[in-house]
């Protein structure tokens, strides 16, 4: 027989599963917390560093654009006062801190300021110089526009980099969350499969076995269980079946002892009266014939007095054995008391019962009985028969008793049928 697999206590198995789930869940939480911290840091950097830089770049670009706009006014103004006012605004904007802190913008602002101041001076002497300086101004204006575009692009790049890092962190978190969900789902699925395989199915098998547990069925069989508690319940179920079988056998034996006469093995008087009453009611309900008889061994007391009680017991046992061999399976017979015996013959008229008991009387009269000391003796039997078709079992036995008395009075060793009730 193959070795039995190792049994695991349920509390240890579930503790290990709970620990594995806790470790797995803690790992998922730590991984997601790391990505969340990364996203938080990128978000704070975007808010505290990048956004202010972008604002400064936007302010710088706006000032440079304002500088270029005022330079345009220097060339488009019709009066010296207008040009002078525009030059004044150019100097103010060129000295703005947002421009001064950006080296490239500061150099471009100084160059433009110097060029516009020189152009204003020349235009004061000769307004036609504005058209002469116009070409160089266009080149400076385009360079300033390119610088503004570069500054705006640099600011946008800063935002794009930080936003991209935040997006990457969120995307990675989403992927990890999906993976963690799949991992936890797989663990839970595995847990459900294990519970179904090693707990729910065995419990259902035990429930079915307990529901169908009967002494008429073989002991339940269970496949090998891995949980110690399930194995213990299965073994207890088998022991319960064994106890039921043992108890049923004991019950049957006790019932047999309670319903049988100790000496002869025939029905005792109580059980006979119960069985005969039931059978008589059935017969009377369906109008079927039934007869009873009372038999008494002749001169039994003299036999006891002559040969001893052991001899009387041997005669009673031999008589019971011969009854068991001679009567039909449906007939009921009991030791009614002492050497007296009662009979019930279902599906038999008084005439048919008379024939049955007469045949048995003759057979008993010819029977040699061996006593404990080896001596052979014979005994005879007197019997009274009565009809039970229209009376109770007690009344019928009373009438059979009268007929038995008559058989005794007429010389014994005979069958007498009770007269029909008037």
Image (cartoon, helix red, strand yellow):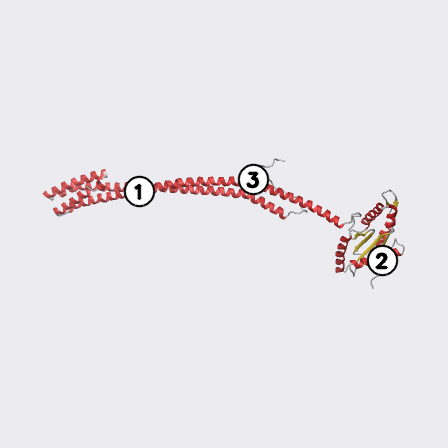
Q: What is the C-alpha distance between the residues marked 2 and 1?
A: 127 Å
Compared to 318, does 394 lie above or below? below
Query: Which residue in the structure is indicated by mark 2?
Result: 403
Tell me the mark number nearer the camera, choosing from 1 and 3: 3
Residue closest to the eye, 270 or 133: 270
Residue 352, horizontal then vertical, whole percent? 83, 56
Q: What is the C-alpha distance between the residues marked 1 and 3?
A: 57 Å
* Residue displayed at 87% across by 46% down: 307
Compared to 312, does 407 lie above or below? below
Horizontal arrangement in the rendering, residue 112 relative to residue 241 (left or right):
left
Residue 92, horizontal then vertical, whole percent? 18, 43
Query: Which residue in the structure is indicated by mark 3?
Result: 9
Of the image marks 1 and 3, the number of the one nearer the N terminus: 3
Residue 324, horizontal then vertical, whole percent? 80, 49
Dot label at residue 2: none
Quarter in which the N terminus is drawn: top right
Query: Residues at badges 1 and 3 in contact (C-beta under 8 Å)?
Result: no
Residue 411, horizontal then vertical, whole percent? 90, 55
Residue 406 seen from this side: yes
Of the image marks 2 and 1, the number of the one nearer the N terminus: 1
- Choose top left, top right, bottom left or bottom right for residue 178: top left
Of the image marks 2 and 3, the number of the one nearer the N terminus: 3
Horizontal arrangement in the rendering, residue 168 relative to residue 384 (left or right):
left
Dot label at residue 48: 1
């Amino acid at each position: 027989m193959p070795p039995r697999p190792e049994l695991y206590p349920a509390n240890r198995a579930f503790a290990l599963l709970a620990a594995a789930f806790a470790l797995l869940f803690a790992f998922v939480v730590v991984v997601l917390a790391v990505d969340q911290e990364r996203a938080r840091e990128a978000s704070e950097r975007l808010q505290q560093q990048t956004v202010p830089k972008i604002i400064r770049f936007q302010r710088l670009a706006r000032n440079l654009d304002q500088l270029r706009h005022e330079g345009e006014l220097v060339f488009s103004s019709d009066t010296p006062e207008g040009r002078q006012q525009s030059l004044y605004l150019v100097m103010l904007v060129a000295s703005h801190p947002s421009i001064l802190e950006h080296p490239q913008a500061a150099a471009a602002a100084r160059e433009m300021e110097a060029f516009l101041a020189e152009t204003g001076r020349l235009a004061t002497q000769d307004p036609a110089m504005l058209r002469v300086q116009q070409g160089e101004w266009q080149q400076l204006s385009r360079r300033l526009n390119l610088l503004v575009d570069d500054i705006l692009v640099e600011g946008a790049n800063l935002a794009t980099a930080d936003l991209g890092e935040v997006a990457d962190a969120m995307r990675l978190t989403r992927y990890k969350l999906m993976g963690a969900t799949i991992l936890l789902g797989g663990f839970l699925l595995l847990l459900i499969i294990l519970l179904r395989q090693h707990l729910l199915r065995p419990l259902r098998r035990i429930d079915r076995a307990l529901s169908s547990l009967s002494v008429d069925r073989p002991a339940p069989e269970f496949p090998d269980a891995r949980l110690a508690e399930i194995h213990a319940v299965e073994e207890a179920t088998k022991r319960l079946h064994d106890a039921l079988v043992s108890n049923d056998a004991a019950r049957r034996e006790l019932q047999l002892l309670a319903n049988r006469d100790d000496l002869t093995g025939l029905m005792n008087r109580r059980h006979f009266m119960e069985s005969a009453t039931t059978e008589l009611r059935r017969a009377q309900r369906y109008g079927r014939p039934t007869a009873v008889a009372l038999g008494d061994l002749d001169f039994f007391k003299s036999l006891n007095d002559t040969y001893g009680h052991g001899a009387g017991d041997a005669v009673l046992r031999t008589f019971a054995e011969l009854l068991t061999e001679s009567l039909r399976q449906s007939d009921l017979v009991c030791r009614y008391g002492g050497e007296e015996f009662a009979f019930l013959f279902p599906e038999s008229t008084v005439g048919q019962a008379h024939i049955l008991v007469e045949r048995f009387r003759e057979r008993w009269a010819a029977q040699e009985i061996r006593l404990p000391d080896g001596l052979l003796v014979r005994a005879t039997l007197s019997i009274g028969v009565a009809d039970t078709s229209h009376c109770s079992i007690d009344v019928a036995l009373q009438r059979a008793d009268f007929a038995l008395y008559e058989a005794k009075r007429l010389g014994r060793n005979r069958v007498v049928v009770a007269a029909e009730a008037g």
